[in-house]
Image (cartoon, rainbow, N blue to C red):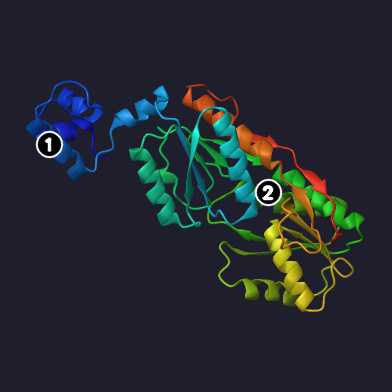
């Protein structure tokens, strides 16, 4: 990566001159300014001053990176993040990546060059090397090796609660229905909690997973029904997964909840997909969003965070599927 000294050498000027051009401060001859700008462009140099500006909080803009704005959980999260930012005098820049790593990389590169105050990010892709430690950032559900604080719900406890509720509803052989992201995420702990509780109670169980993203959803759900015909309870990794399973099960003549009890995870029952109303593990979306913003703005002010992970309790919301 090019340094300010590299720019100065290429332009044939002093480092201080490059700094004055970048900050638009002090007198610099037009011809010299043009040489410096050309060197910056040729070397694709991202000024260190950008990181300094973050710390000085010159910007009132915070970026939110989401895999998909269409997902009701992400939409609700964005609503509360924007509201909390607005209360604090900040504005939101929405970056909808569609879950594509190349688009996420593009956004991170853009954000490095634009003076946003910080980033709240949700990503399940391998983009570790592009996450700049110089930009204040809070992650939702994802751990990075750098010092980036993660805000998440208590996924492990959510899995445990789901297993117990299925058993209480009469399930004798429940299954976990999920997918595996390319990078480790706190969402994987939903399965861990489910399996832990099943083993602790001595309940037979099944786990069905495919790599994320699922290439063929129809095949994914039909394979599950074919491989596990004796399942009488399902804990799905998300509410959307649960809703799609219920739809497929109905087409196969399986009744919910008479034949199979179903519990999702997120708590977005207001979405029209949910008929019948889904029993679910409700994430504290508003608290997660507001906590993420408060932590980020603290980082922008230079505060050191004592915890690497902020884990917020979940609740069970009974519906018509158990």
Q: Is residue 173 left or right of residue 188?
A: right
Q: Is residue 247 left or right of residue 15?
A: right
Q: What SS does tag 1 mark?
A: helix
Q: Are marks 1 and 2 in contact (CB under 8 Å)?
A: no
Whole-percent x, y for residue 322 in the image: 87, 59
Which mark's residue is nearer the viewer, 1 or 2?
A: 1
Q: Is residue 132 left or right of residue 276?
A: left
Whole-percent x, y for residue 285 in the image: 67, 42
Residue with the mark numbered 2: 189
Query: In terms of image quadrants, where is residue 51?
Result: top left
Q: Give the camera-side residue of 229 and 29.
A: 29
Label 2 Cα neighbours within 10 Å, binned few <14 / some 14-19 / many ≥20: some
Label 1 Cα neighbours within 10 Å, binned few <14 / some 14-19 / many ≥20: some
Q: Give the camera-side residue of 163 and 314.
A: 314
Total marks placed: 2
Q: Give the camera-side residue of 94 and 2.
A: 94
Whole-percent x, y for residue 127 in the image: 44, 49
Q: What SS does tag 2 mark?
A: helix
Whole-percent x, y for residue 80 in the image: 62, 39
Query: In terms of image quadrants, where is residue 61?
Result: top left
Q: Residue at x 13, y 32 (%)?
A: 33
Residue with the mark numbered 1: 34
Residue 48 seen anywhere in this rendered image of the structure? yes
Name above or below for residue 197 compared with residue 59: below
Q: Is residue 15 left or right of residue 193?
A: left
């Amino acid at each position: 990566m090019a340094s300010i000294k590299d720019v100065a050498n290429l332009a044939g000027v002093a480092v201080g001159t490059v700094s004055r051009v970048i900050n638009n401060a002090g007198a610099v001859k037009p011809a010299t300014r043009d040489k410096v700008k050309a060197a910056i462009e040729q070397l694709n140099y991202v000024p260190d001053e950008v990181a300094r500006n973050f710390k000085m909080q010159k910007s009132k803009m915070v970026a939110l990176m989401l895999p998909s704005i269409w997902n009701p959980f992400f939409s609700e999260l964005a609503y509360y993040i924007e509201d909390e930012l607005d209360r604090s005098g900040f504005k939101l820049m929405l970056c909808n990546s569609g879950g594509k790593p190349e688009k996420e990389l593009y956004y991170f590169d853009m954000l490095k060059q634009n003076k946003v105050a910080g980033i709240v990010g949700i990503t399940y892709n391998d983009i570790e090397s592009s996450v700049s430690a110089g930009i204040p950032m809070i992650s939702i559900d994802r751990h990075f090796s750098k010092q980036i604080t993660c805000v998440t719900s208590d996924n492990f406890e959510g899995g445990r609660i789901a297993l117990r509720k299925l058993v209480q509803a009469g399930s004798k052989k429940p299954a976990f229905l999920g997918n595996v992201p390319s990078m480790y995420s706190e969402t994987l702990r939903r399965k861990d909690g489910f399996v832990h509780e099943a083993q602790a109670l001595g309940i037979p169980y099944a786990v069905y997973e495919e790599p994320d993203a699922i290439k063929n959803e129809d095949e994914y759900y039909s394979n599950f029904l074919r491989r596990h015909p004796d399942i009488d309870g399902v804990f799905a990794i998300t509410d959307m997964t649960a809703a799609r399973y219920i739809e497929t099960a109905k087409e196969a003549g399986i009744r919910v909840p008479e034949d199979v009890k179903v519990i999702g995870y997120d708590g977005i029952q207001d979405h029209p997909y949910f008929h019948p109303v889904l029993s679910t593990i409700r994430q504290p979306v508003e608290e997660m969003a507001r906590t993420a913003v408060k932590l980020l703005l603290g980082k922008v002010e230079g505060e050191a965070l004592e915890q690497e992970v902020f884990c917020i309790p979940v609740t069970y919301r009974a519906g018509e599927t158990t």
